[in-house]
Image (cartoon, helix red, strand yellow):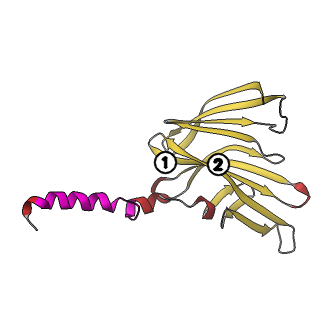
Amino acid sequence: MRPQFWPVTMLALAILSYGPCGSLAAATAIDFKNASYPNGACGPVTLSGGSEQHAANSADGPTISTELDEVHTGKLGTHDAAVVELRCGGPGGYASSSADVYLTDRGRLTFLGSVAESDSFAPELRVRFASPFLYVDVSEHPELAGANVKWKVTTYRLNGKKLVTVNVLEHIRKN
């Protein structure tokens, strides 16, 4: 190889190492459908294919299922982050849900906090990342189509590695 082509060759190798097969891309990818969530809707859970089923309290107890409902990703400050919505249900129509914020830097989930939780319904969430802020709109009763529904809009940001509330606004709007 001629010396004048050496810089071009090194540049090409550097670019290819960060591509889809490179270590950087592989290290930052998270498979949300097959991840462990320490603070899910029904407690700690490890999903397989987007869901998990286990017996409540004992091997003979009723089966409780947890499902990954939705994942919203974006930047929170300088960090990659995700809002993960989990739904949990059991016999007799019991249901709960949670929306938790995680840092996703370096391919790991780091729990920051919950932005929505419910033991009796699945709240409607609207999530928007606009770095350095995270905006979460939560409707407390999305089943009331056409009615005046209370919404809570909360703005979050990172302070170090902690999720802090910047502002909360409650308002009524037609669904």
Q: Which residues are magenta?
A: 5-24
Position of residue 137 measured from the top left corner of the image (x, y, whole percent) = 68, 35
Q: Is residue 46 magenta-colored?
A: no
The foreground one among 39 and 121 is 121
Residue at disc 2, secondary structure:
strand
Position of residue 83 measured from the top left corner of the image (x, y, whole percent) = 61, 47
* Residue occupied by mark 2: 100
Q: How many marks?
A: 2
* Residue occupied by mark 1: 80
The foreground one among 6 and 100 is 6
> Is 54 drawn above or below residue 120 in the view shown?
below
Q: Residue furthest bottom?
A: 59
What residue do we see at 66% from left, 50% from top? 70
Position of residue 21 measured from the top left corner of the image (x, y, whole percent) = 39, 65
What residue do we see at 92% from left, 58% from top? 92
Query: Left or right of 16: which side holds 11?
Result: left
The foreground one among 119 and 74 is 74
Q: Are marks 1 and 2 in contact (CB under 8 Å)?
A: no
What residue do we see at 61% from left, 65% from top? 34
**Mark pair 1, 2: CA separation:** 14 Å
Amino acid type for the residue under numbered disc 1? Asp
